[in-house]
Image: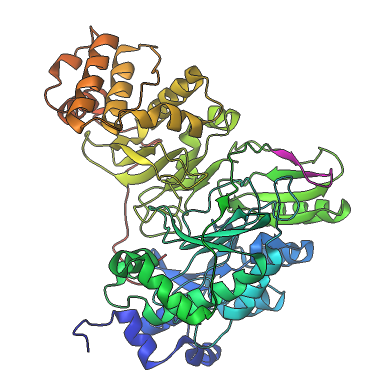
Amino acid sequence: MTDKKLNKRERHKATLSPFEYYPQIETLDFTSVSEGDVFYLQDFGIFNTPIEEEDYTLRLRITAGRITSAQLRAISEIVTRHNLEIILTARAGMQLHGLNSENILNIFKQINDIGISTWQTFGDNVRNIVTDVYDGRGSASVIETYPLILQMQEYFLKTPHLVGMLPRRISTGISGNSANVTSFFANDLYFALAKRGDSFGFNVYMGGKNTEIARSADIFLLSDEVVSFFIAFIEAFNKHGLRFTRSRTRLFYLLEEIGMETFLEHIAHEYQKTWHKAGELVLEKARFSQYQQLRDGSYAFCYESNFGRVSAEELNAIADFAEAHSAEVRLGIDHNIYLLGLSEQYVPFEHLTKSQTVVACAGSHYCPYSFWNIKDDAQLLPLEKIHEHRIQIGISGCAKGCGRHQHCDIGLIGLRTNNFGDADKGARIYIGAEHSTGISVGRELFEMVPLEYIRSVIDSLIEEYEQSGCDTFESFSTDILNRYSAEFIALWILVKLESGSTIKLHAIDTQDNLCEEDKFIIEKELLFQCFPKASYVPLIDDNFSDTIRQLSKKLWSVGKSDPKIAPQIKKLLSSKKYWEV
């Protein structure tokens, strides 16, 4: 027996399972839902936010991001009729915003009737299984994973003992491509293309989340072993996962508590077969352009959304063009829409956002945790340079990390600060992630930068990258940024901003064998050599922290913020206890 207390959501499940609750939806008064109703409705993709408690949102599961022109038109018609908003999700799905108590049930039924499920898109469920948008068709595609995703989904979707009954959500990624548009190492479970001997298959990684890299389980699976392993994994997690303190129920914390080896023993008990040790990971960095040639010689086009927002009119236009040109439509996990199978590099769409490599979370307009309207504020970034260099940017509105800010080249968490005067909006900035092959997440560069000055910091980082001669920003992180401490890089940027210097940051020999004190001495001496006249460098004592704080205060302290850039943030005081990602 344990003296630990089940968390509130688990106590609801113990009383009535979500599958048993489901029939009540037909007669539910959506104008007056209880706390229990709110929990259960999430298991069917229906939720409301404390920002607007009378409004509802519906999350759509787009299997592997593949959607038909007919489904696009049907969604567009529903959105137009009810004056709704559409945002694309980071799991290649959609959310419809602006529903209300009068139309939510009918729209829920209409969406599920067009071959798109909303079941288990929220709550404690297996979320939409994601793969690379070029799965099966790209030049880097070795194993098409869509058939495997369909089999995995068939196992858990609408399965009574799994609907809403997991200890916490499970995010799954699988890719049979040797290069992916974005990384999948933020998933709880990731099947990555690998080779063992002469056979291609998948290495297994576990325990990722938005702020952590999934770790190797030292397992190699052939394609025909993936589904049975996935089933064993889900059953083991459901039986042995943590169900007490809600904030520590993700797989990451279970592995932290019992260890990878013990959890693999639980999986082996369910799997009832043996597996091979991990093979060689087949994964490389690649640059993807707006037009991409596919394996059959045809082309794919990336339609840039407005930082995840699309309109009904856009969906109709995409559906019409795709149908006229026999193109396939897919949603990416990068908040963009892709058209595959074009005979030439031509589309009639104009794109002005330069947002292809920027993932921006829902923001304060849709989420109660966010302090920024992320999708609007993202336009303040140096988008031309970001687009030119294909720099991957992730922006989250809070520490939960829905913008995957530590799994990209440059990451930001939009927060609120009074550290520099009256400026409300600020961001924590991360750099140095070696995300493509799952080596490391980003490191914190600055704890807080006021919104007005974020662009200058990112401009400075991009200038360093341009001077470096590195092929990609990620290789710049590997070869240069990650050879230094984050504190040194922060001070280097600040001193350059203060002095206007254009001096180039060079790679140095690895300091891995040095103690922290010796590394600090080398970095301090480099600052003295490069900036002998800088006013703040002589103030460095036995660490960089005090100098960083003083210089950032000097550069970024403000009086009244420009209301067009950083308006005062007024958060509604509604309870947030129902809203969880």
Q: In x, y percent, where is residue 518?
A: 20, 26
Depth order, front residue of 482/351:
482
Farthest residue to the top: give it.
Answer: 533
Q: Is residue 417 visible?
A: yes
Q: In x, y percent, where is residue 566?
A: 36, 38
Q: Residue at x 56, y 27 (%)?
A: 471
Quadrant in which residue 520 is drawn: top left
Q: How many marks?
A: 0
Q: In x, y percent, where is residue 485?
A: 29, 31
Coloring applied to the structure: rainbow
Image side of residue 148 versus residue 328, left or right: left
> Considering only vertical position in the picture, is 354 above or below 295?
above
> Considering only vertical position in the picture, is 33 above or below 399?
below
Depth order, front residue of 4/268:
268
Depth order, front residue of 73/465:
465
> Considering only vertical position in the picture, is 344 above or below 281?
above
Is residue 293 found inside the magenta-colored segment of the image? yes
Farthest residue to the front: give it.
Answer: 197
Quadrant holding the N terminus:
bottom left
Q: In x, y percent, where is residue 359?
A: 52, 46
Dominant secondary structure (helix, strand or loop) of the stretch shown in magenta: loop
Farthest residue to the left: give it.
Answer: 541
Is residue 193 found inside the magenta-colored segment of the image? no
Q: Which residues are magenta?
A: 290-299
Quadrant holding the C terminus:
bottom left
Image side of residue 147 versus residue 97, left or right: right
Q: Residue at x 46, y 50 (%)?
A: 403
Depth order, front residue of 559/196:
196
Q: Is residue 43 visible?
A: no
Image side of residue 385 versus residue 213, left or right: right
